[in-house]
Image: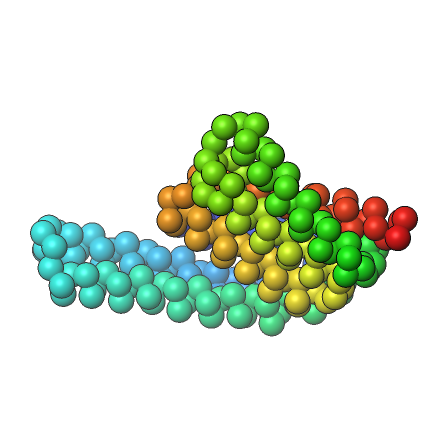
Amino acid sequence: MRVHFAAAIVVLLAVLFLKVTPTEFAFLALSILSVLCAEMFNTAIEAVVDLVSPDFHPLAKIAKDTAAGAVLITACGAGIMGYLILAKYVMPLYAEVLAMFGTVSDMGTIVSILIVVIVVVIVKSATGTGTPLHGGVPSGHAAVAFSIATALSLITCDPLISFLSLLLAVMVSHSRLLMKIHTLREVIIGAILGSVITLLVLQLFKMFG
């Protein structure tokens, strides 16, 4: 619920800033409320199942998984609704931001990713945490994933490709959390490190290339 409420606040703030139409706001509000209601039903079902079947039971698992799946489907529907409504407002603005940095060279992209890998190894050695390919500060997978996403965003200057690349980078980073290889702090540090280094290196290549 905390995540859903945080997402709802972000969307509502965006709605105020972008000045969407009343009809579009109504659809967005309905989508947000449907996700919150689905999450509440999911919580209620889980509570009832735990009350009726405190011990593990295959049918109890099916009930909980189905309720959680309903929340996921509702959230996906809300995401699609949000994209269809907000894309025409957000994408042009995002395209202008990407255009400010301009396209970059292939060599700059390769060099930036290599520098990110080198910096990750150096930082891990300096902090004495993890190995070059496993654990420690920062998350190498998150750093490289966000480095590639940043490079793709600047190479294509396409808002949709940039969004999908960043989404994939988030999924890679999230997998490190699910596998308990990295903490949230390590993943965030890696993501920031990969993005910032790539952005700086590519801009240097653009200026002096």
- At 67% from the left edge and 51% from the top edge, which residue is drawn? 113
Instruction: Tell whether 10 sits left or right of 111.
Output: left
List x then y, in percent, for residue 14. 64, 55
| Count of residue discs | 0
The residue most toward the right is: 208
Determine the image quadrant of residue 154. bottom right
Quick check: can you spot residue 8?
A: no
- At 9% from the left edge and 52% from the top edge, which residue is drawn? 55
Instruction: Tell whether 32 sits left or right of 152.
Output: left
List x then y, in percent, for residue 41. 29, 60
Quick check: can you spot residue 65?
A: yes
Depth check: give the residue in front, 106 or 173: 106
Determine the image quadrant of residue 107. bottom right
Depth check: give the residue in front, 159 or 39: 159
- At 33% from the left edge and 66% from the top edge, which residue is drawn? 69
- Image colouring: rainbow
List x then y, in percent, for residue 178. 38, 50
Determine the image quadrant of residue 40. bottom left
Depth check: give the residue in front, 209 or 8: 209
List x then y, in percent, for residue 77. 47, 70
The residue most toward the top is: 127
